[in-house]
Amino acid sequence: MKETDDQQSGTSPSADAETLLRTGRHFRTLVDNISHLAWMADEHGELFWYNQRWHDYTGKQPDEMRGLGWAAVHHPDHAERIIERLKHSRDSADSWEDTVPLKGKDGKYRWFLARAVPVRDESGRLTCWLGTNTDITEQREVEQALRESQDRLELALTSAEMGAWEANLETGESFWDERAAALLGMLPEEAPTTIPEWLAFVDPEDRQRIETILQGILEGSVTRVDTDFRWDFPDGGQRWLANIGVMKRGDDGARKIHGVVMDISRRKGAEEKQRESEERLRLAQLTAGVGTFHYNIQTGAVHWSPEIEALYGLSPGKFEGTFEAWKSCVHPDDFPEAERRVRKAMETGDFEDEWRAVWPDGTERWVSARGKVFMDGAGRPLRMVGANVDITDRKRAEEELRRSNEELEGRVARRTAELELRAEQLSRLTSELTLTEQRERRRLSHTIHDHLQQLLVGAKFGMQTLDKQLADTEREAFEQVGWLLDESIKVSRSLTVELASPILYEAGLAAGLEWLGRWMEEKHGLSVEVRVDGGADIPREDIKTLVFQSVRELLLNVVKHAGVDEASVEMKFEDSESVRVTVADGGRGFDPEMVRHGAPDLSGGFGLFSIRERMTLLGGYFEFESVEGGGARFTLVAPVDGVPRDATAPLLPMAAQARPEEIPADPSPAARKRNDGRVRLLLVDDHEMICQGLSMLLAVHEDMEIVGQAGDGLEALDRARKLKPDVVLMDFSMPKMDGVEATRRLHEEMPEVRVIGLSMYEESDRAAAMMNAGASEYLTKGGNTDILLDAIRRVNAAGAA
């Protein structure tokens, strides 16, 4: 060493320490050349000697290490802990060890294992400390890497829902960790401890295969296990498990298998469903004569299914799998167009074409092809997947049809002059039949509403009066009949609306079109945006009916043919003489020339051709425009006034029948008080059956008193003035004056009288009209009777308050 003993001492050691140093030169030489950092400190822990390795690592001079200067090379987070450790060891005079980070002369820290032993004199007194610091950085890194590896393994097993297992092939013992035991449906202490125990739970159909694998491992022909099997749970359930393991010899020479187990039940289920799906697809393709293809655009490889090979007259596996091989199977006259469409599909992503396939024996068959091109993120085409189907029979039928059409057109041309007059007569007759049909629809609608529905509701009211008189044994049959009546009322109400919308004739075309928009969405899922000019209406019933039915048919055509779920209807009065109604959609469209030239429609009902003819005959016109794939727009322009060609006769209501004697009114407060709080009711309905049913139903309730009846709105006002009722049950549709107008006048004249609107229909427009006119409630006649009774009592209580 270059330094003297005094230089290395740093402090004045005790006499014993000096003696030790003088007699330990050989020791210092040895210590200076060992790989450890060695040092000595006095009994207070202050450094007075260190070896050359310490200086080489720290780069510190002796003067820098005096006293507790050694703490400068310790990490600040650990220095205080080391000082406290030295103090504790000094007091206890025990040896110690610890791990500390020390800073090297390059400014970086490395981990050291620090050990110190006390040196004592003959009397046992502590004289100094001898210590070494051993670099353990690599060891710590290895240990840290091992811990991280174990953590990753643990995380991987947990995330993948795997469990670890081990089997000793020499002893037959097996071990399953907690996760593996859970996959076996057992607690860790219940898991099999031997291979035979484990095999007992393997499904018998799989057990022989597993035993063969184990036998192969014992014989040395198999060193890896990778298999799946069905595991029978102790409780009777079953699950698919997969075992993966490798065979290794342990330190004792025993052959052991270390592996993992995982649940693959979902994968097996998906595989089974995929196999079933593929089998169904194969059968469907075989039945329909459809084959599939896959074209790898990058490599040029083409794969055909056996079905598509059959379409081209090839045996399974005979197709060479190239673009050129496909070209050789296509008729030379058809291939240029087919190739052009393939190139175009590389840009658009969709492929569709038809061509003639030429079989090896010269037979020609027609093939229709559809495909989809898949591209990468940069828009480059990668592959095309699609299907071919044999359309030879269809093509032959089309050719035969074309020839037949040509012959037919020739015959039609020769008879055109003769048929023109007949066609005009037929179109006029069709127009008249359409209007006649609508009148019949209205007649049927009114018949159902004015007779059948009223009879059903009256029957329901009548039945409910018997409710409290029935024995328990008769209750079930009674409720069943009530349910049948409710269903009959619903069916008849729906049929009435679909035959002829009452909104159209009660509130006009604008309200009728708004109702039609809601009806299309409720019945057919078509969302219709309706924009109407509600400032005027069409007085001619035939025009109003034709426009409404035409719009209805156009919307139904959107549902059936356009392939969209949205449309729009706009009604606008252009002037005092005409109204314009436009129906538009963004669907697939059609060829307008087919309709303009009088081709028959395929939709049935009010076809486009017939709508045009009928509108023309009634003084209007019908226009339309469409582009295939670009939607369609239809415009109806109709006159709003003038004398109709054949005015519809009004439908007369049923004649009013005699009503029971009415209870005279006594409007004085004293007389009202004498009624003992009973609700005085006036029944207003043009159907005597409804009035009778309501009377029977309400009469059984002691807090209700029927003071009179009326058959129309005018009569209702007159009776209300005389009888002073508390509550009026007002029908919506009546002759002379409807329920809305009667309610409005009654509310203005006698606001203390409460009105409950009644109707066979559930339309929100009717409810809003009645409530706006002053009604307190709006209910359907076929509804729950308890709701009606509650409404009567509630509005009466509100009026009394």
Image: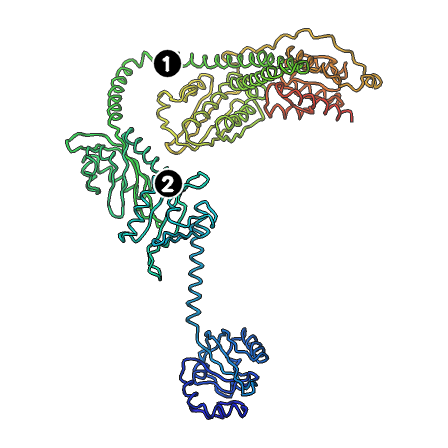
Residue 151 in the image, given as x and y percentages of width and height: 45, 59
Callout 1 amino acid: Ala
The residue sitting at 62% across, 12% down in the picture is: 459
Name the side, left or right, on which 162 lies relative to 391: right
Residue 183 in the image, given as x and y percentages of width and height: 44, 46
Does the rendering let one see residue 634?
Answer: yes
What SS does tag 1 mark?
helix
Callout 2 amino acid: Asp
Q: Residue extending furthest right?
A: 670
Residue 101 in the image, given as x and y percentages of width and height: 49, 74
Q: Residue extending furthest left?
A: 361
Residue pointed to by mark 2: 203
- Circle nearer the N terminus (1, 2): 2
Q: Crowdedness of circle 2 by 10 Å Cα count: few (<14), some, many (20+)?
A: some
Residue 318 versus residue 728 in the image, above or below:
below
Residue 785 in the image, given as x and y percentages of width and height: 65, 20
Q: Report the front residue among 133 and 590.
A: 133
Quadrant assignment for the N terminus: bottom left
Question: Which corner quadrant of the image does residue 784 belong to?
Answer: top right
Q: Residue extending furthest front?
A: 171
Residue pointed to by mark 1: 423
Does the rendering let one see residue 540?
Answer: no
Query: Which is closer to the viewer, label 1 or label 2?
Result: 2
Q: Report the front residue among 685 and 159.
A: 159
The residue sitting at 78% across, 27% down in the picture is: 801
- Find the distance from the CA under tag 1 to the CA under tag 2: 80 Å
Name the side, left or right, on which 529 lies relative to 353: right
Name the side, left or right, on which 722 lies relative to 786: right
What SS does tag 2 mark?
loop
Q: Report the front residue among 699 and 274.
A: 274
Name the side, left or right, on which 420 lies relative to 180: left
